[in-house]
Image (cartoon, helix red, strand yellow):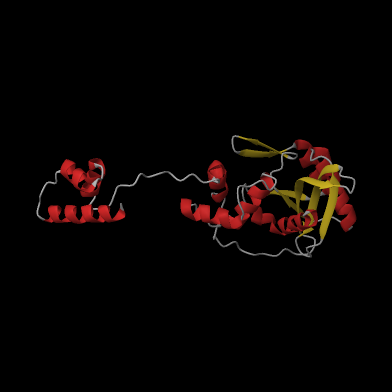
Amino acid sequence: MKKKLQKVIGVLSIMKDFNMKPNFSELERMYGIDRHTIKKYYENGGIPERKKFKKVSKWDPLYDVIISLADVPGSYLMSIFQVLNYEYNGNLPGNYNSFKAYAYRRGIKCTPADQTPHVYYETEPGEQLQCDWKEDLKIHSVNGELYEFNVFSATLGYSRKHVFIYSVGKTEDDFIRCVLETFRRLGGLTQILKTDNMTAIVSLRNGNRKIHSRVQSFFNDLGVKLELCECRTPETKGKCESSNRFVNWLIS
């Protein structure tokens, strides 16, 4: 069959060079090959047209999730794979090499991190305390019991001394209690306490921030100035963010 096809292709090539229209029925009788097949060879320059099949990947059901993770600034393929592995409890359709090959094949590119330089600055002793919540932590006891909790983390701007306080909730009362406990452990007050726009102390309406009156009165009584970070600027309390990574290492 292969030799017959080669002969037919040779004949068709010659006929094409001389602008001759082949008689496909006659060629079918001569070589015993279906005339429709011969016509396809003739129209495609001796190369049969192959049906194109859309390749389906086992990663396709996760495509939208992968794209959303790749849009996060500073993401990279390994971090996306680790997130997927955690979210789906290890039940992924392949290993990292398989995932990487799929990403390259589909042209998935990670969004680069913000390269805008942030000015590094220091504060004087006793000037600033940065604080934040490390939220929704989960650990299991040796008996398999699940414990869910939060950690109030605070870091002195000058010495980088960290204070971690266990807390079940993240309410306004929890925040005030943790701030008092932090200053008690440090043995004094700072001039400024810097934190983000946590819902326990701030209300956001139409883009405007308003500190809860009870919280503001609390800081007025302490003689400490409460400063709020701008939205989506974690670097302004980066020393506290570093202490939160330490908590991550302990949990993992």
Question: Residue lying farthest top?
Answer: 205
- In percent of the image, x 66 and y 64: which residue is there? 121
- In percent of the image, x 79 and y 65: which residue is there? 159
Q: Position of residue 9 (x, y in %)?
A: 22, 54
Looking at the rendered image, the quarter that the C terminus falls into is bottom right
Q: Position of residue 194 (x, y in %)?
A: 73, 52
Vertical arrangement, residue 246 with respect to residue 69, above or below? below
Residue 82 shows in this picture: yes
Q: Position of residue 25 (x, y in %)?
A: 18, 41
- In percent of the image, x 78 and y 55: which residue is there? 247
Residue 110 shows in this picture: no
Q: Is residue 210 left or right of residue 251?
A: left
Q: Is residue 201 left or right of residue 73?
A: right
Vertical arrangement, residue 120 with respect to residue 56, above or below? below
Q: Nearer the viewer, residue 221 or 161?
A: 161
Q: Position of residue 106 (x, y in %)?
A: 47, 50
Q: Is residue 236 left or right of residue 25?
A: right
Vertical arrangement, residue 191 with respect to residue 23, above or below? below
- In percent of the image, x 43 and y 43: which residue is there? 54
Q: Is residue 172 left or right of residue 198?
A: right
Q: Please tell me how many numbered marks the rendered image carries.
A: 0
Q: Nearer the viewer, residue 72 or 44?
A: 44
Q: Nearer the viewer, residue 84 or 117?
A: 84
